[in-house]
Image (tube, rainbow, N blue to C red):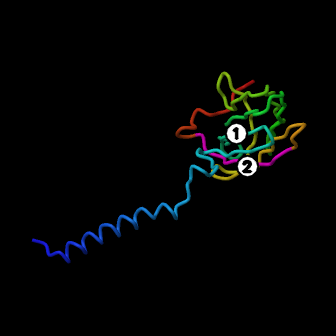
Amino acid sequence: MMRPIRRGLVALAVVGSMTLLASCAVFSPKTTNENYDAADGVTANLGEIVARDLLVVGSKGEQGLLSGAIVNNGTDDASVTITAKGQPQPVTVSLPGGALVTLGNGEDQTNVVVGNLTVEAGSMLDVTISTPTGGQVVTPVPVLPAEGPFATVTPTAD
């Protein structure tokens, strides 16, 4: 049989530990309130134009492929130009208002080839995204090797 003093101390310890554990959330930031890139790629904002999950797949000295998506959050049509060091020529993408265009090597995707990559996989490559009305933004984009989930992400002939 437990003594009343000991029972009181146990109850106090239980209540105290529950209060302490519950207060942990006070010191932890709510990550759902933070904007962050939850994928391998990065985000670039240019007014109503948003590029999401941008990454380049390839190896230094070879062709790479820009993968991701571009969204026009506005109601007006937009023209987006994408350039990167080593890219044979800038690629211009037409985006109707409210539209999304995916970048990659799929049938319904826009192929943005970065020729002669100047950085190793695991590095960052500056990609410039511009619009006539929104100006331009230079975004460091990760370069990933064409292996694992990216093994089939390679440039295709136009």
- Give the residue at mark 1: 64
- SS state under label 1: strand
Q: Is residue 133 magenta?
A: no
Q: Please tell me which residue lies in front, 17 or 127.
A: 17
Residue 16, located in which quarter of the rendered image? bottom left
Q: Tell me what residue is drawn at x 79 percent, y 27 percent.
A: 97
- Amino acid type at circle 2 is Leu
Q: Position of residue 66 (x, y in %)?
A: 70, 38
Is residue 17 shown above or below 77? below
- Give the residue at mark 2: 125
Outermost bottom residue: 5
**Distance in Å between CA atoms under marks 2 and 1:** 11 Å
- Amino acid type at circle 1 is Gly
Along the polypeptide, which appears first: circle 2 or circle 1?
1
Q: Position of residue 32 (x, y in %)?
A: 57, 49
Describe residue 152's horizontal placement relative to residue 15 as left or right. Answer: right
Q: Which mark is residue 49?
A: none
Residues rendered magenta in the picture: 136-146
Outermost right residue: 132
Q: Tell me what residue is drawn at x 70 percent, y 39 percent.
A: 64
Outermost top residue: 107
Is residue 123 shown above or below 84? below
The dominant secondary structure in magenta is strand
Q: Quadrant of the N terminus?
A: bottom left
Contact between labelled residues 1 and 2, with CB atoms less than 8 Å apart: yes
Q: Please tell me which residue lies in front, 62 or 83.
A: 83
